Image (cartoon, grey):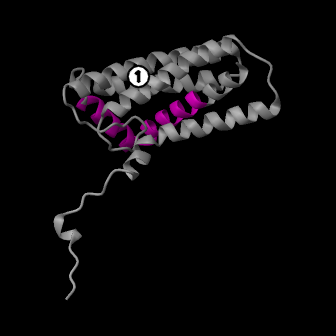
Amino acid sequence: MGYLAIGIHCLIGVVFFASSLGKSAGRRAFDRFVVSVEGMRIMPSRRARSVARAVVAAECAVCVSLAVPVTAATVAGLVIAAGLLAVFTAAIAVSVRRGVRTPCRCFGASASPLGPRHIVRNLALTAAAVTGTAAVAAPGAITAGGAAVAVLGGLLLGGLVAALDDILDLFRPALLTPNQFRTDST
């Protein structure tokens, strides 16, 4: 399971790196994230800024843990990631159930409202982090070529996950008014 561990390590690392960077890439980005946290209405508004800071700090802790080339640090990073993702999933589920349509600022810039796709994404990432933890504990023989493919696959998948809202928005039908369908033959 060595390749699986490597791929998941890279996937989770990219997702949390993009997430923490997107939320902390300047005061405006962080303020938008704070507004999103407040808009979820799962805690008192006065706590939104401190919760947002804690989220970014925890995401950075995942990144640092996964960057350290020590098995125990990798396991810790994946366990923290799984825990954070479970909390994020629960918070989003509560907000969606209440009909809250605040933008998902999961990766900073997206203005897509929270919805079921965010819950599914986070459940899949939680499962990946848990699987990665088990895979790290059962290393297998690896080759340089196989490791390179696993790294590339994990990085690519992580980038796709980080850009998921933007990708899905590309396939959303454009809103057209009835007059835009008319063709004048005069």
- Asked if residue 12 lies in the magenta stretch, the reply is yes
Q: Is residue 144 above or below residue 65?
A: below
Measured from the top left, where is residue 141 in percent x and y? 80, 19
Q: Is residue 131 above or below residue 53?
A: above
Q: Is residue 88 above or below residue 172?
A: above
Which image quadrant is residue 173 in? bottom left
Which residue is label 1 attached to? 54
Nearest the viewer among 183 and 29 is 183
Which image quadrant is residue 158 in? top right
Q: Is residue 93 left or right of residue 62?
A: left
Measured from the top left, where is residue 58 in percent x and y? 47, 22
Dot 1 falls on a residue whose secondary structure is: helix
Residue at 23%, 69% (x, y): give it: 181
- Asked if residue 89 lies in the magenta stretch, the reply is no
Q: Is residue 130 above or below residue 40?
A: above
Measured from the top left, where is residue 28 in percent x and y? 36, 44
Nearest the viewer among 180 and 85 is 180
- Amino acid of disc 1: Ala
Residue at 50%, 19% (x, y): give it: 127
Q: Is residue 97 left or right of residue 11?
A: left
- Range of residues picked out in magenta: 11-39
Q: Is residue 146 left or right of residue 48?
A: right
